[in-house]
Image (cartoon, rainbow, N blue to C red):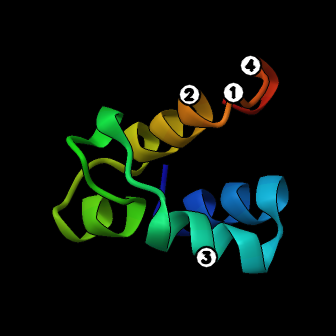
Amino acid sequence: MRLTEFWDQMNNQFGPAYAASVARDHVSSRLGGRTAEQAVEAGEPYKKIWLAICGDFDLPPRVR
């Protein structure tokens, strides 16, 4: 997964404004207590970050 694909998925599932808020504000235990933005900056794979968001928000398997 590329960064653009990650953001496409975020925007599709949450809408652009809420996607930015989720990435900036939601702290995930699946990401070691970091936000998605912090995980991106730390170099985590984008797919791992996306799957963490999917799990935290109970998104359906078809979008994972």
Measured in 3D between alpha carbons, the distance from the residue under mark 1 to the one under mark 3, in whole angstroms, is 18 Å
Mark in front: 4 vs 3 = 3
Q: Position of residue 51 (x, y in %)?
A: 51, 33
Quadrant of residue 6 in the image?
Answer: bottom right
- Element at label 3: helix
First of labels 2, 4 by sequence position: 2
- For the residues bearing labels 2 and 1, Cβ distance under 8 angstroms: yes
Q: Position of residue 31 (x, y in %)?
A: 29, 42
Q: Position of residue 35 (x, y in %)?
A: 36, 59
- Element at label 4: helix
Give, as a three-letter code, the residue at label 3.
Answer: Ala
Quadrant of residue 39 in the image?
Answer: bottom left
Q: Position of residue 9 (x, y in %)?
A: 70, 54
Q: In the rendered view, would you say 61 is above or below 26?
A: above
Mark 1 lies on residue? 58
Mark 2 lies on residue? 55
Q: Residue at coordinates 24% horizontally, 51% vertically from top-left?
A: 44
Q: Is 17 left, or right, of 40 in this rendering? A: right
Measured in 3D between alpha carbons, the distance from the residue under mark 3 to the one under mark 2, in whole angstroms, is 18 Å
Which residue is more in the foreground, 4 or 36? 36
Give neighbour class at mark 3: few <14, some 14-19, many 20+ (Cα, 10 Å): some
Give, as a three-letter code, the residue at label 2.
Answer: Gly
Mark 3 lies on residue? 20
Measured in 3D between alpha carbons, the distance from the residue under mark 4 to the one under mark 3, in whole angstroms, is 22 Å
Give neighbour class at mark 2: few <14, some 14-19, many 20+ (Cα, 10 Å): some
Q: Is 8 left, or right, of 4 in this rendering? A: right
Q: Residue at coordinates 31% horizontally, 64% vertically from top-left?
A: 40
- Element at label 1: loop
Outermost residue, bottom side: 17
Give neighbour class at mark 1: few <14, some 14-19, many 20+ (Cα, 10 Å): few
Mark 4 lies on residue? 61
